[in-house]
């Protein structure tokens, strides 16, 4: 085991996989940083410091610094993958998915299906995402609702450094296209990480972050951290919560969620995306359809309101879910009737 | 003209096969037997064949919604394509793609595409893969190529792809087939650089060529130069614009009210690449009319056989809807 940040867990895993498999390449804006400047290559090393040192180690053919051209980045990832490479493309902010949407949604996601199973497209699309540091409406969004709804795409949302490592390695070795949603607010989080060079976490397996018998909290990404805090606070009052970190939104570990709700009879869904047509509504629907008989209270959703992400500190705080909002929702399910 | 008799025969056979494939589809679609949208390549055959005759299976192409000609020219199976268009489980894509999504990865055909302008970025990715693989024993790179029309030349994706290819020196070729119509709109209106697409590519910093796309020999000879340039490591991408003609509408069923009086008759009379080829090779006594007539008859028969096979092809079952979304899930 090693103590690593979430950022270094991602970086080290990509680096190791590039050493292990020469088909693995990275591309994106400023993944080298400094190209064409007095500072020279690696002057930046990626704005998230997730690709620092890659250019020096692997060279320009495998570490492709691109212009600001998200459609071309996404499309090139698709073309590289169809041609037998294993690209890891970085879309610097998940919000820029809009620029590149066609290449993801109409191309990468659908190649295999449209071509009758005769193509393999093992592309990983990294999308740093999420709010929490006042970056306003176009640099803060959670976009899980768009990608989870895309047949053909797998979607990963790690919360811990260890999961970031195991899920990233699985994503790179996986033969299907994967969108890897890394939460920007988690980059500095430190934790123990399995150092086995083949450590992978299979997709579709949730993690039980906290165990309790009274209420099930289902969350993903940064929201898991808030749910853990809420669960710890509630435990002080004798309220026990299962906190289920779904880890991958597609495929989804339905069983882990339903098994827990069958025990607790109460469910709180926490989602960083706005509330309509989202992961929150999707999971609520799942529970209502498949665990209806177990429910002792209406399902609660803790989500931002149906608004863009605001800028000012007070407004962003009001927008985002929080441990206090989650705890209040838990208590509401317990107070029902 | 440096082609030997065998190569000339092959080129004509390929062009004629595409022509008959498309003419037959034009008839069959009117019966209602074929579902969906179909965009025919008739009139542009010299481009697909004049380009693809130079390529190997290591070279990759990305095509368009008007892709049948590119697919056939790159070596996709005629029966498999016809079955696909008929929606058969035996089709090249198991009936999942249809006319607009025919692909054969093993042949280096990375897919027709229903989205105008979507192909160029994918081609750049495939070209970057070729660049990573490096030159062969003769010091030459495999290339990747995007066919685009005068419609796609207005898409931002095409611009982004051209710039990325230049910046990364990707061995990528942008083939612009200017058939003068993007859907139902004339190129004089829709393309600001009037009557010229190649200059756009040139502005992105790559070398460009232009040729008459109705003259197979012009296409073939020009593309050989383009290919030689791009296969050379370090040169990066290039573009070529072929002036060509679309004999049918944007899609089958298009009433084509935008056509001028007698326009289609004139194009068929004066700008038909097959007629021009025939006149050229018989005039120069490279092939005789009987040889060409035989190829014509063979092509007709091949299409007849393909249609018969497509009609008899296995139909997909409802449970097949779930196949091949993922490799594992």
Image: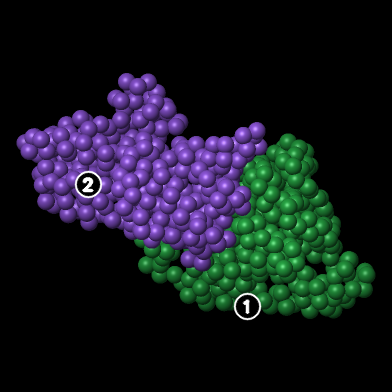
Chain colours: A purple, B green
Above or below, B18 against B259 in this view is below
Q: Regarding mark 2 in the picture, which secondary structure is present there? A: strand
Question: Residue B112, how many percent across, how many down?
Answer: 60, 58
- Name the residue rendered at 36%, 42% in the picture: A5
- CA distance separating discs 2 and 1: 62 Å
Q: Taking A81 as reference, is A304 left or right?
A: left
Q: In which quarter of the image is residue B73?
A: bottom right
- Name the residue rendered at 34%, 25% in the picture: A316
Residue B305 shows which numbered tag?
1
Depth check: give the residue in front, A324 or B83. Answer: A324
Q: Can you identify the residue that label 2 sits on?
A: A209
- Name the residue rendered at 60%, 40% in the picture: A41
Q: Is residue A183 visible?
A: no
Q: In which quarter of the image is residue B220?
A: bottom right
Question: Residue B87, how many percent across, how many down?
Answer: 51, 66
Q: In which quarter of the image is the C terminus of chain A?
A: top left
Depth check: give the residue in front, A19 or B209. Answer: A19
Depth check: give the residue in front, A31 or B260. Answer: A31
Q: Taking B231 as reference, is B61 left or right?
A: left
Q: Is residue A318 visible?
A: yes
């Amino acid at each position: 085991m090693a103590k690593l940040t979430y950022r270094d867990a991602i970086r080290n895993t990509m680096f190791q996989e590039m050493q292990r498999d020469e088909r693995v390449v990275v591309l994106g804006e400023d993944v080298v940083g400094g190209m064409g400047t007095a500072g020279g290559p690696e002057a930046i090393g990626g704005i998230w410091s997730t690709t620092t040192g890659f250019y020096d180690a692997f060279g320009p053919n495998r570490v492709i610094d691109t212009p600001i051209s998200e459609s071309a980045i996404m499309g090139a990832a698709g073309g590289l993958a169809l041609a037998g490479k294993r690209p890891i493309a970085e879309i610097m902010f998940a919000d820029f998915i809009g620029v590149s949407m066609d290449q993801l949604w109409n191309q990468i996601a659908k190649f295999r299906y449209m071509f009758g199973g005769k193509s393999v497209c093992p592309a990983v699309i990294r999308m740093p995402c999420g709010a929490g540091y006042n970056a306003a409406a176009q640099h803060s969004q959670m976009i899980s609702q768009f990608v989870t709804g895309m047949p053909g795409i797998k979607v990963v949302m790690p919360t811990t450094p260890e999961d970031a490592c195991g899920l990233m390695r699985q994503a790179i070795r996986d033969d299907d296209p994967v969108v890897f949603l890394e939460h920007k607010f988690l980059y500095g989080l430190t934790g123990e990480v399995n150092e086995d060079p083949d450590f992978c976490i299979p997709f579709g397996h949730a993690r039980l972050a906290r165990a309790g018998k009274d209420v099930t909290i289902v969350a993903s990404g940064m929201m898991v951290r808030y749910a853990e805090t809420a669960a710890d606070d509630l435990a002080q009052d004798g309220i026990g919560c299962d906190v289920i970190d779904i880890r991958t939104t597609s495929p989804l570990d339905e069983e882990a969620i339903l098994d827990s709700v069958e025990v607790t009879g109460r469910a709180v869904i926490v989602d960083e995306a706005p509330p309509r047509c989202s992961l929150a509504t999707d999971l609520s629907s799942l529970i209502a359809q498949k665990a209806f008989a177990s429910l002792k209270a209406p399902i609660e959703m803790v989500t931002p309101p149906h608004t863009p992400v605001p800028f000012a500190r007070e407004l962003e705080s009001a927008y985002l879910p929080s441990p206090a909002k989650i705890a209040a929702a838990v208590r509401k399910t317990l107070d029902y009737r | 003209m440096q082609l030997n008799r065998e190569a000339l025969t092959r080129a004509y056979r390929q062009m004629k096969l595409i022509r008959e494939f498309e003419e037959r589809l034009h008839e069959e679609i009117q019966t209602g037997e074929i579902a969906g949208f179909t965009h025919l390549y008739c009139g542009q055959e010299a481009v697909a064949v004049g380009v693809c005759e130079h390529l190997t299976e290591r070279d990759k192409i990305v095509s368009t919604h008007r892709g049948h000609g590119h697919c056939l020219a790159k070596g996709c199976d005629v029966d498999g394509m016809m079955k696909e268009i008929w929606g058969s489980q035996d089709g090249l894509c198991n009936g999942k793609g249809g006319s607009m999504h025919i692909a054969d990865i093993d042949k280096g055909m990375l897919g027709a595409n229903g989205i105008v302008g979507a192909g160029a970025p994918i081609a750049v990715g495939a070209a970057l893969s070729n660049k990573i693989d490096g030159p062969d024993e003769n010091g030459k790179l495999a290339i990747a190529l995007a066919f685009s029309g005068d419609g796609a030349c207005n898409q931002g994706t095409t611009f982004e792809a051209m710039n990325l290819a230049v910046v990364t020196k990707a061995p990528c070729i942008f083939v612009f087939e200017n058939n003068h119509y993007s859907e139902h709109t004339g190129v004089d209106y829709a393309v600001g650089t009037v009557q010229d697409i190649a200059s756009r590519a040139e502005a992105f910093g790559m070398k460009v060529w232009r040729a008459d796309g109705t003259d197979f020999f012009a296409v073939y000879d020009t593309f050989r130069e383009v290919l030689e340039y791009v296969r050379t490591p370090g040169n990066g991408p290039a573009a070529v614009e072929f002036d060509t003609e679309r004999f049918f509408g944007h899609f089958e069923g298009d009433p084509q009210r935008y056509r001028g009086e007698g326009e289609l008759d004139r194009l068929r009379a004066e700008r038909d690449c097959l007629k021009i080829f025939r006149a050229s090779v018989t005039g120069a006594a490279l092939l005789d009319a009987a040889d060409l007539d035989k190829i014509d008859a063979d092509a007709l028969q091949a299409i007849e056989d393909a249609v018969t096979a497509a009609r008899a092809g296995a139909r997909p079952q409802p449970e097949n809807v779930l196949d091949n979304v993922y490799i594992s899930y």
